[in-house]
Every structure is written in structure tokens, then in C-alpha cells.
Amino acid sequence: MGFFSRLFEGMKKTKKSFGEKLKYIFTGNDIDEDFYEELEFVLVSSDIGVETTEYIIDELRERAKKNKVKKTEDCKHLLKEILVDILSQNKPEKLGSPCVIMVLGVNGVGKTTTIGKLAKKFTDEGKKVVLAAADTFRAAASDQLEVWANRAKVKVVTNEHGVDPAAVVYDSIQAAKARNADVLLIDTAGRLHNKAVLMEELKKISRVVNKEYPEAEYHKMVIVDGATGQNAISQVELFNEAVELTDVSITKLDGTSKGGFLISLAKDFDLAIRYVGVGETADDLLDFDPKEFVDAIL
């Protein structure tokens, strides 16, 4: 199954929620205020935030006027252009070598699974990969990461439960250097019941990376669960305040109708949307493509 086919299949629920509603708006009638009000309702009800929706409506009005568009059916391609523009404003650059990707996110979003999928993806591309099991709070995290490491046949650096995560990262950097690795993937804890402690841990890990591996390209990528919709925005804000995120990736988009929140995410944050997960297998972690995404939901 090709890239677009996997994405289209994975986005079926969002398309049904979002795209199907739009069918009843782009009917070929004259553009009037009722059209814009109905479109605003559909956008907000499809998990696109209020501020982003207002921006989209204002932009659509302006483009329709500029292009002398009079009929609603002729507005659909303008809406697509606007959504693609929003999603393209922070397009991710190709990863360099060596690079470090610290993976963050709350418990249950799929951080460790995403790291495992990335390990396979990178090794399939011929890259040398090292994994750092820096979630020393959750007892099963290291075991889970070792399973993925064995599948991808890559080195994983672990330590005892409760050990300082920054110490694991330090050891992982030395291992990455010794192996001349292209990518170091760092798994981190996601507990939020003691938010201040977690954020300090993440800041300390960042200090270690910056000090011990200055030659590496450093990415701080937050993972959000697509099923949480607009609630994911507050999670991104939280981690961004702590470590100044560079990238975001979304998991479990195949199981939700709330994929529209990606548009708000792209509009609100100076972050590259790098990967989207639309299934259980490693091959279902896809490089994000704005145009393909908009085509899949509209």
C-alpha cells in the first residue's frame, strides 16, 4: 500500500467527520453570510480551534474576493489552499547526522512505540541508531524499548529503575559517539502528577545533550495522541515552555475523527509536524505531508 493510500485509509474517520460535512456547504449556491456561518460551525465542530477557524474564514473571504469567486463550490479549492498553507508554514527539514531526538509527551501517547518505529525506519534507511531508555520512572519502559531495539537490531542503553535519566543520556551519548551513530533517540518519562519534577528532568537532559554532544543536531519532539483533539494543544504548550520544542508528531490518527486539530497545532506553534501514525505497524508511521493530509480529509 502506497503512502497516500495508507494515509487516506488512516484518516477515514476524520474525513467522515470533516469532509462529509463540507459536502453540504459547497453546494454551488451563491456565497453569502449563511455560507460562512455554516463553514465556521463545521470547522469548530471538527476540532479546529476558534481562533484558527476565524483566521481561515477571514482568509477565505479575502481570497474569494480577490479571485472573484461567487459560488460556494468554487471555494473548496481555496479552502484547501489555506489549510495547506497553514500546515506548511513550519515544514520539517531533512534530519542531519549526527542528530539527537529527545521524545517527550504524557503517558499513554505512544512515545516508546514511536521510538521503536523510528528505529526501524532509520535502520531501513541505512542509518546507525542508538536508543536511550531515559524513562527510568516507569519500570516497564526499558523492557518495552529493548523489545523494539531487538526488532530493529540497534543498541539500547539502559540503567536501573529510578536512576537519574540524565545519567542514562550521558552514557547513551558516549555509546552513540563510540559507534559513530547517525541518530540517538531518547525516551523520556511522561508522568504529570509531579509536573515540576518532570520538567526539571527534561531541562537537565537537554543541558547534558548540549554540553556533551554539541556537534549533533538536536530535536525536541513532542508526541501527542490524535484522539485527544484540542486537548493536545495544552500538552504541547506545557512541554514547549519547559524545553522549547522543535518538532511534533501525532499518533493514533487512524482511530479518531479529531484530526482537524493538527491545523490549529500548526497555526498556534512554531513547530514542524514531522510524523503521523495511522496504524499499528512500523510502516504506518509516515512523514507528514501537508497537501496529502488535506487531500485525505477533504
Image: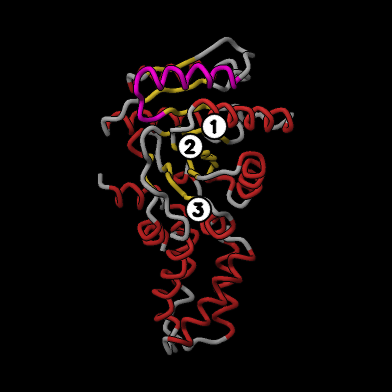
Q: What label does residue 262 carry, if any?
A: none
- Image quarter hosting the N terminus: top left
The span picked out in magenta is 165-183
Element type at mark 2: strand
How far apart are labels 2 and 3 at the CA level? Answer: 28 Å
Above or below 40: residue 219: above
Q: Residue at x 54, y 80 (%)?
A: 35
Q: Which residue is under mark 3? A: 259
Mark closer to the chain start, 1 or 2: 1
Residue on which the image places disc 1: 210
Q: Secondary structure at mark 3?
A: loop
* Residue type of the residue flagged with mark 1: Asn
Q: Main secondary structure of the magenta part?
A: helix
Residue 146 is inside the magenta segment: no
Query: Foreground mark, 2 or 3?
Result: 2
The reply, left or right, for residue 56 in relation to residue 201 is left
Quick one: label 2 or label 3, which is nearer the N terminus?
Answer: 2
Q: Amino acid at mark 3?
A: Gly
Residue situated in front as seen by the camera: 280 or 190:
190
Q: Which residue is mark 2?
A: 218
Q: Is residue 169 magenta?
A: yes
User: At which x and y percent is residue 135?
Assistant: 57, 22
Q: Amino acid at mark 2?
A: Tyr
Q: 60 or 130: which is nearer to us?
A: 130
Above or below, comparing residue 179 to residue 190 in the picture: above
